[in-house]
Image: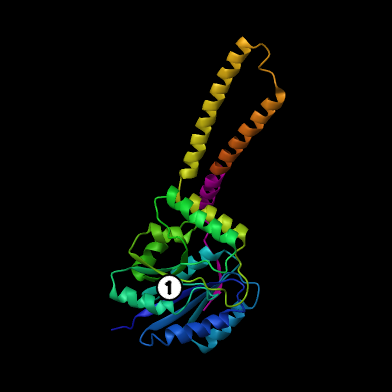
C-alpha cells in the first residue's frame, strides 16, 4: 500500500527573511512528527523582487521534498493559492502563509482529525487579534458581518487560508476557475464538512506584511462582489426610493406654488438637491461598474497565472 502524502502549499512574495525560518520550523514541528507520511513542500513564488526564489532553490538542492513554482510577475496571493492546489500531488493538501503567523504544528492535529473524524477539511481561525491595529481589526469584523448578511454563505470571523483538505475537496476547488478569486468564499461555496480550530493571533516571525489597508479593502470588495448580488439590489431600491421622493417633492412644490406665490424659487436649495441626487446616481452606477468590470475580466479568459519556471 502506498504511503499517504501531504502537500503543503506556501504562497510567497518578497519573504527572503522568513523562508529559512519557516522551513526549519516545518521540519522540526511537523515533518519529524509525522515520519510515516510522505511530504511535498510546494513554494509558490509570486513574482518576488528579492532573493526569495534563490533561497527556495538552494533549499530544494538539499531537500528533494521541496518543489517550487515561480510566476512571471506578481499575480497575487489568490493566483498563488490556485497554482499551488493545481500542482500539489498529495492526497492531503494544506495551505499556509510563510510568515509563521499560521502555526505549522497545527498541521499534525489537522491530519489526525481528518483521519479519525468525518471531515473533509480542517481550517484555522484566529480567536484574538492581539497585535493588530485597532482600525484594521474593526474593519475586518465589520466585513465578516456584512458579507454574512448579504450572501448565502457563512464565512467564519477570523478565518484564515490556513487549512488541510482531502483530495476530493481540492479537486472541487480546482473546478472553480473564475479569474476574480476569493478563496475564503470558494472554500465555503464548494461545501464539504469543515472543522474549525481556533488559535491566538501570532506576530510575523520576520519581515513586513505585504497587505496594506487599501489592498485589504479591495480584497474585501472582491469577496462582496464575487459572492453577493445584494449591492445591485441596494442600488435598485435606492433608485426607487429617490424616484418616490422626487415625485413627492414635485407635488409639494406645485401645492406651495398654488397657495404661496413664488415659493418654487430658490436656486441654492435646487443646486443642493441636484448635487445630492447626482451623487446617489454615481454611487449606484459605481456599483454596476464593479460587477461589469468583473464580468469583462471573466470574458477575456486570461490565465489566472503564468509560470516562469518550476522544478
Residue found at the far bottom of this picture: 62
**Horizontally, is 41 left or right of 279 in the view?**
left
Q: Which part of the image, by quadrant, shows the N terminus?
A: bottom left
**Colour mode of the rendering:** rainbow
Is residue 202 inside the magenta stretch? Answer: no
* Residue at the (60%, 64%) spot, across then down: 133
How many labels, in total? Answer: 1
Question: Can I make out residue 256 in this image?
Answer: yes
Circle 1 crowding by C-alpha within 10 Å: few under 14, some 14–19, many from 20: many
Q: In the rendered image of this protein, does residue 239 appear above or below residue 41?
A: above
- The residue to which callout 1 is attached is 94
Residue 165 image point, x, y percent: 38, 70
Residue 153 image point, x, y percent: 40, 54
Residue 265 image point, x, y percent: 69, 18
The secondary structure type at the circle numbered 1 is strand
Residue 268 image point, x, y percent: 71, 26
**Horizontally, is 147 left or right of 20 in the view?**
left
> Bounds of the magenta span?
289-311
Question: Can I make out residue 301 in this image?
Answer: no
Q: Which of 24 and 265 is in front in this view?
A: 265
Q: Which of 107 and 42 is in front in this view?
A: 107
Q: Which of 305 and 235 is in front in this view?
A: 235
Q: In the rendered image of this protein, does residue 7 appear above or below residue 156?
A: below
Q: Nearer the viewer, residue 265 or 295?
A: 265
* Residue at the (31%, 83%) spot, across then down: 2
Q: In the rendered image of this protein, does residue 8 appear above or below residue 139?
A: below
* Residue at the (54%, 48%) spot, across then down: 296
Residue 177 image-quadrant placement? bottom left
Residue 170 image-quadrant placement? bottom left
Amino acid at each position: 500500500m502506498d504511503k499517504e502524502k501531504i502537500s503543503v502549499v506556501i504562497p510567497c512574495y518578497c519573504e527572503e527573511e522568513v523562508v529559512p525560518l519557516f522551513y526549519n520550523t516545518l521540519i522540526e514541528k511537523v515533518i519529524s512528527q509525522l515520519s510515516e507520511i510522505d511530504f511535498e513542500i510546494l513554494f509558490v513564488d509570486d513574482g518576488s523582487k528579492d532573493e526569495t526564489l534563490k533561497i527556495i532553490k538552494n533549499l530544494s538542492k538539499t531537500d528533494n521534498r521541496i518543489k517550487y513554482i515561480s510566476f512571471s510577475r506578481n499575480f497575487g496571493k489568490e493566483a498563488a493559492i490556485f497554482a499551488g492546489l493545481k500542482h500539489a500531488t498529495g492526497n492531503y493538501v494544506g495551505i499556509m502563509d510563510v510568515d509563521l503567523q499560521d502555526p505549522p504544528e497545527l498541521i499534525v492535529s489537522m491530519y489526525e482529525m481528518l483521519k479519525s473524524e468525518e471531515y473533509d477539511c480542517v481550517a484555522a481561525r484566529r480567536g484574538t487579534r492581539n497585535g493588530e491595529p485597532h482600525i484594521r481589526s474593526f474593519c475586518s469584523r465589520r466585513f465578516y458581518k456584512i458579507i454574512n448578511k448579504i450572501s448565502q454563505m457563512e464565512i467564519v470571523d477570523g478565518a484564515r487560508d490556513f487549512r488541510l483538505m482531502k483530495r476530493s475537496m481540492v479537486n472541487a476547488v480546482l473546478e472553480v476557475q473564475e479569474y476574480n478569486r476569493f478563496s475564503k468564499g470558494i472554500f465555503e461555496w464548494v461545501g464539504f464538512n469543515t472543522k474549525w480550530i481556533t488559535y491566538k493571533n501570532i506576530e510575523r516571525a520576520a519581515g513586513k506584511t505585504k497587505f496594506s489597508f487599501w489592498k485589504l479593502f479591495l480584497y474585501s470588495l472582491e469577496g462582496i462582489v464575487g459572492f453577493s448580488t445584494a449591492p445591485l439590489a441596494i442600488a435598485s431600491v435606492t433608485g426607487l426610493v429617490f424616484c418616490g421622493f422626487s415625485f413627492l417633492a414635485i407635488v409639494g412644490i406645485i401645492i406651495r406654488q398654488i397657495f404661496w406665490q413664488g415659493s418654487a424659487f430658490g436656486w441654492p436649495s435646487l443646486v443642493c438637491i441636484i448635487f445630492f441626487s447626482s451623487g446617489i446616481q454615481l454611487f449606484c452606477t459605481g456599483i454596476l461598474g464593479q460587477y461589469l468590470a468583473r464580468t469583462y475580466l471573466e470574458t477575456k479568459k486570461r490565465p489566472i497565472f503564468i509560470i516562469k519556471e518550476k522544478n
